[in-house]
Image (tube, rainbow, N blue to C red):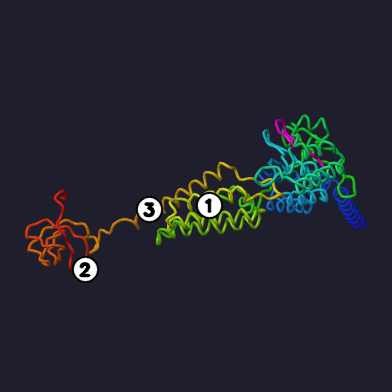
Amino acid sequence: MSGKTSKKSSKHLKALRALWLLCLIAGALPLVAAVKSSGDAHVDFISVDGSINPAVDDFIRESIARAREDGAKALVIQLDTPGGLLTSTRSIVKEILGAPVPVMIYVAPSGAGAGSAGVFITLSAHIAAMAPGTNIGAAHPVSGGGGEVKGVMGEKLENFTASFGETIAQKRGRNTEWAIQAVRKSVSITEKEALKKNVIDIVATNLDDLLKQADGKKVEVGEREVTLAVKGARVDRFDMSLKEHVINVLSDPQIAYLLLMAGILGLYMEFSHPGVIFPGVAGAIALLLAFASFQILPINYAGLALIALGIALLVAEAFLPSFGVVGVGGAISLGIGSLLLFDAQNSDLVVGRSIVFAAVGTLSAYMLFIGYLVLRTQKRRQTMGLEGMVGKIGEARTPLNPKGRVFVHGEQWSAQGEEEIGAGEKVQVVGVDGLCLKVRRASPTRS
């Protein structure tokens, strides 16, 4: 009986131990989850280095969506830009203002800047930061050629851009007066001045310093207030996709312009030297890539028409006896069209004049040189066949009265003289009639 009781007590003890173990596990699960959650705290990081264009717009939009999906505490955008398309800038600002996660704009590294379009993007961030040795400002709207937009349209554009910057600064509680001055007077300031004037929130030496200083700050995300908890968070870095990289490269107006010039030169070389193949293939690819760039960039169609006219005139120089007038006109048209090509009012994108002058000079010089060679070939006296015999000096082998035989160019020919010529006298060929040479007595001074 006692043995049965002992076995029963042992079973009860085992059951109690199992129950206690389950309770301990259940109690520890929230703690483990909290530790795991704390250990998984991370921020997403992307870098924008270059002009603001549709590729950058897509990149930032996708990055914000990804940060929300993977539970990132914030999205950090390292920025270094001279400006870009106003349409892309407005889209990016809209995405940041409505972002479901905190967005930090960090103008870095040292030597970087947030110019023009970069001003509005930085102002729109939940946390705006700059590295030492950086600057921000100069947001006055300009034409694609780098000049000021004149007239009523220029005034309208300036007013719109100024109110755009003021609205963003007001939304984020930043210096609205400076935002207006950055547009109207193109003012630019350093990171220290920006912090002092309440244009940015933080001056950080590096990313870790940025996260440390931003930790604990309260920001408005949507309609709720969020306290940032990013100190020591893991940084997940992301880059553009291949498609975005290609679009980003093609969105550079200097690359687009050089592709256009290379395409035209390649096709011209193929047409002037048929059968070479490589210049034609390379030129066609470059020209198609240039047209793809024109789908992204705002272009001036008058400038494109002037470029087409310039090319036509340079080609025509090879066939018209204009003594260079048509060719020079073509070069001038090509140069003016190149300077106006990206002259659009909603862009800060510029093709450097040195690049324009170098490309136009090279292309014009090559086409004019080929035209000169063609013209010289057309005017050159025939040296082959029967026509090539005209002007040659020979010797009469029989008397020409008026017909006989002459020895010219190593061969004997039937000949007809303009006058009676004796055998052994020097003769000069003045014409060809079928297989009969027309000759005259050679001048004594001729050899």
Looking at the image, which residue is at 28% across and 59% down?
382
Outermost residue on the front side: it is 419
- Is residue 98 part of the magenta span, yes or no? no
Q: Tell me the tag on residue 261.
A: 1
- Where disc 3 sits, the SS reads helix
Looking at the image, which residue is at 12% across and 56% down?
426
Q: CA distance from mark 3 to mark 2?
A: 31 Å
Tag 3 and tag 1, C-beta contact below 8 Å? no
Q: Which residue is mark 3?
A: 373
Tell me which amino acid carries mark 2.
Asp
- Between 221 and 69, the one lying in front of the other is 221
- Between 369 and 83, the one lying in front of the other is 369
Give the mark nearest the N terminus, 2 or 1. Answer: 1
Q: Quadrant of residue 190?
A: top right
- Is residue 131 part of the magenta span, yes or no? yes
Q: Which residue is mark 2?
A: 433
Tell me which amino acid carries mark 1.
Met
- Where disc 2 sits, the SS reads strand
- Between 42 and 14, the one lying in front of the other is 42
Q: Indicate which label's residue lies in the foreground, 2 or 1.
A: 2
| Neighbourhood count class around disc 1 (C-alpha, 10 Å): few under 14, some 14–19, many 20 upward | many
Residue 372 in the figure: left or right of residue 68: left
Q: Indicate which label's residue lies in the foreground, 3 or 2.
A: 2
Give the mark nearest the N terminus, 3 or 2. Answer: 3
The segment highlighted magenta reads 125-137
On-image quarter of the N terminus: bottom right
- Where disc 1 sits, the SS reads helix
Q: Residue 43 appears at what percent x and percent y?
A: 76, 44
Count of picture labels = 3
